[in-house]
Amino acid sequence: MKRLGFLVLAAIAAWSLPPGAAAQTTPDQIYAELAKLPAAERQQRLEDGARREGKLVLIHTMRGNLSVDHVALFKKRYPFLGVSLEGDIGSQDAAERLYAEETAGRHLTDVINIALPDVTTLAGKTMVARYPTPAVAALLPPYRGFIDAENRWTPWYWSEHGISYNARLVPKDKAPTQWTDLCNPLFKGSVSFDPAEDRYLSGLYAIMGEEATEKLLKCIGDNNPIIQRGHTQRIELMLAGDHMVQGDNYLYHGISVQRKNPSAPYAIAYAVPVMGFAGIAVINRNTTRPYAAALWTDWTLTQESQAYVGSLLRGPVALKHPYLPDSAKIVTYNDAPPDVAKRLLGYWNRYVAKR
Amino acid sequence: MNGPDRHPSRLAIARRRRAYTRLWLAPQGDGASAVPSANRFHYGWRGLALALLIVFLAYQVVVPFLMIIWTSLKTARPGESEFLDLTFTLANYVRAFESASFWRTTVNTLSFALASTTFAFLMGAFIAWVVERTNTPLARLIGFMLIGRIIIPGILIAISWILIASPNIGLLNQVVLELTGVRNVVNIYSFWGMVWVQALEMVPLIYLLLSAAFQAMDPRLEEASTMTGAGNWRTLRRISLPLALPAVGAALLLLFVTAIETFEVPLLMGTRAGVRVYTTEIFYDTSRTPIDWGLAATYSMALLVVAIVLLFFYFRLIRHGERYQTITGKDYRPRRIDLGGWRYLTCVLSLLLVFLITGVPFLMMLYASLLPFYQAPSVAAVESMSLANYWSLFQSSKTIAPMINSAILGPTVATAVILIVALIAYFVHKTRIRGRKILDFLAFAPIAIPSVVLGATFFWFYLLVPLPIIGTLVIIGLAYLTKYMPVALRFVSASMMQIHNELDEAAQVAGVSWGRNFVKVTLPLLRPGLLAAWFWVMVHAYRELTIALMLARSQNRTAAVVILDLWEEGSFLLLSAFGVLMFIVLMALSIVAYLVGRRFGVQEQY
């Protein structure tokens, strides 16, 4: 009875203590401490911490089995860690998921993998941890621009958006050679886009600046574009002959289809600059499993993870690109400033979506 | 084959149809026939049950309504400290009303709903008339095939029609091009394409409602008209139509409410057609970072207002409709019009319509599910057919687990819903407890909340409330409870009003406790209505997309969400195989429900 009374009193005392009294180490502090350690000790500390945490809640935006297989490789390397994987979700949706959870004070997710241009809102609201990691040393020179000086994200792959077309419907001499060819009357009503995406608009901005982007979006709107949700679906539809050109899409999917079926009429407009944006790991600033989150983030840049990325035809940042020729003109970028991004979205809504 | 169970009499069929009329024309609160027996409120188990019901309804219904209204009056996001302040603003309304897109969306929503309601009504009314009031051959088969369509999810119907009538690659366009050289005679990605598919989706509902109304007409009035020398046309115009008018009006309003809150067709076809409606606008407003919750809530409010106005008229109509009802204690056989030779034409036309509504989408799915790659029908296509797509599905946990999730959700939600609405119907129709009409109103009110709004509201509510149900089937199940209560309540209320109050009183006199009486007497007597409601909710909860999409995470994905995923990934052939499997699972569940119904002798209810 005495013991029970003591426990109750202790519980009440703990409950009534001011928040600061029980000094909590934040993920940012843990990561700052880790950064001071020698590599081997740092790695040991990470693994020990992750073993204690035992679990990782991860949002992975590679669809279906791609994320499952990627995580399986990670679990093979660190079998002591249980991974709760959220897959089949788009990059914008993943960013919004973390944003919503954190706004509501629910710290459910540890790490999200998203496209770099989708991190703006999260970074603006200081919802992301600062994680300095030596793993970024593996990045090849063309991709070092993806690294954040403030360590708010870790780039581990990159994606490309460019123009592709149905080679059966578009004669070679009429193939697009520049972004403004999307306004070619030959393609009227036959160029498809997903609904507005920040990463695409930011890419156009990186390639041609704001004024030219606005002009381009206006003439795209005048050319009666097809707006349809689903990148993969649009590629399939284009290859089936539904329309001629993809005005914005990942280029790898058509390559993937062509490798399975060499007669698929897929062609990439290599003369048009390709926009390249990073896929990044972002750690929740309030993660309850900081070590496990860091372990995943570092692992994404290992050789086995990068080789896996290459095998999926995505762009590894520590290895050579699996299919893009050296002659391809690639414009890498991070995100547009928030005020510019807002205006770009406005142009899209006004001219293309006609909202 | 000889028992009454196998061959329901025409009398029994007439009884079933009238049950549908009672269902949709059942007044709110006390029915005219319901005489409350218990004048005093007894505390105890009954009081506890009532208190729990009130708390449950407040939690499940009032909270979502409040969330929508509150959010529309805030510029802060839910979760931010300013969100809970008692300062409100009309900024979201000003922003919405000032933008041209709001008004364009409003016009799109209303015109889409109006056009699809009209088309659905014309087709459904024609088939209902042919089946119920004429001597057209194969009438029962036509009705059966049409009702069978209910178990095919709406999203599959939409996708099937895209594969059929898409420009350039649609099967129909390819065949026409092959035969005539004319390119793209139809384009499903258009306003009228949307209207066509939505109308087909709603035909079974209008058929159910109107066939019930046609059956409920007293033929003696028509016979009297004929005897006074009026012809068929004059009798139809002066007698039949006025008798059916309240039911027709109520059916039209219900259809209109269904059409304005529909999501699948506007998402899959409207986005590409450039036709945005309220539901897609809300979906896209909630699919960007940061989500514009204020604007989304404002669109939700617009949708709610339209739905509530329509429901107001609906309730006025059904109240008015009571005066027109000609159902008496006598059973009668409705008079069938002899169409002479024309009956073959009506038969062919009806079969054609039913084939378009049920047959075409299913055959399209079946055909595509067997192909290695999508191609027009040909000898080569037939030769290339295999079960490889089905095999791929069985090898992937991504598709099987959601199918199991839906198979759990459907029956579980259906069981929970009927237990709750049985209690509500009891308190409303068998007691005189003050405020019982509020129970009825609260349980019916969610019919005005569009699914896309309900899903978003539950998501936010459970983010703010620290209950660990996000990402589980529980959160989807709770949202479904709210979603399916209104219609289930109408089913059960109709049955409850048929139970004599003497049974309740006899139990009280015999000293049987309320709880025991409810479980041992009331519930068994309600079996027909409960089973009909269970079947309806089970099928709809199994195939539901919109709410599941808003609340889905990796562990609680449902079958309909996987269909949308497969569609967006362009896996049309896998998707078709999945659709066929889903159809088979639902058929199996329906047959089980039917057999259970037969076991209790209540198969006539559905």
Image (cartoon, coloured by chain):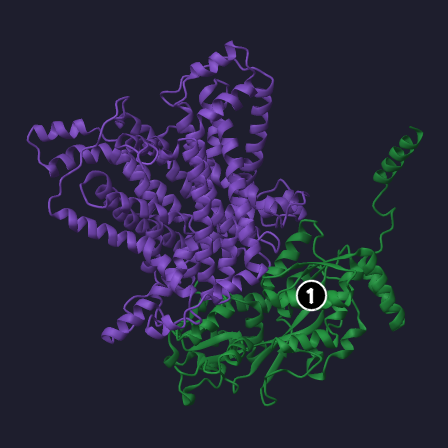
Amino acid on which disc 1 is placed: Val
* Image: B256 above or below A119: above
B121 on left or right of A244: left
In the image as oriented, which residue stretches furthest toward the left?
Answer: B229
Chain drawn green in the picture:
A
In the image as oriented, which residue stretches furthest toward the right?
Answer: A2
Q: Residue at x 55, y 18 (%)?
A: B514
A59 on left or right of B202: right
**Residue B359 shows in this picture:** yes
- Image quadrant of residue A314? bottom right
Could you tell me residue B540's position as x and y percent?
Answer: 45, 45
* Image: B290 above or below B7: below
B562 on left or right of B273: right
The kind of secondary structure element at disc 1 is helix
Could you tell me residue B373's position as x and y percent?
Answer: 43, 72
* Image: B130 above or below B561: above
Pointer 1: what residue? A71
Q: Residue at x 38, y 47 (%)?
A: B150
Q: Residue at x 77, y 60 (%)?
A: A81
The answer to which of A341 and A171 lies nearer the viewer is A171
Chain drawn purple in the picture:
B
Could you tell me residue A285's position as x and y percent?
Answer: 75, 58
The residue carrying pointer 1 sits among few (fewer than 14), some (14 to 19) or many (20 or more) residues within 10 Å by Cα, namely many
Q: Residue at x 55, y 33 (%)?
A: B57
Could you tell me residue B412's position as x and y percent?
Answer: 54, 40
The answer to which of B205 and A106 lies nearer the viewer is B205
The answer to which of B238 and B356 lies nearer the viewer is B356
B127 on left or right of B600: left
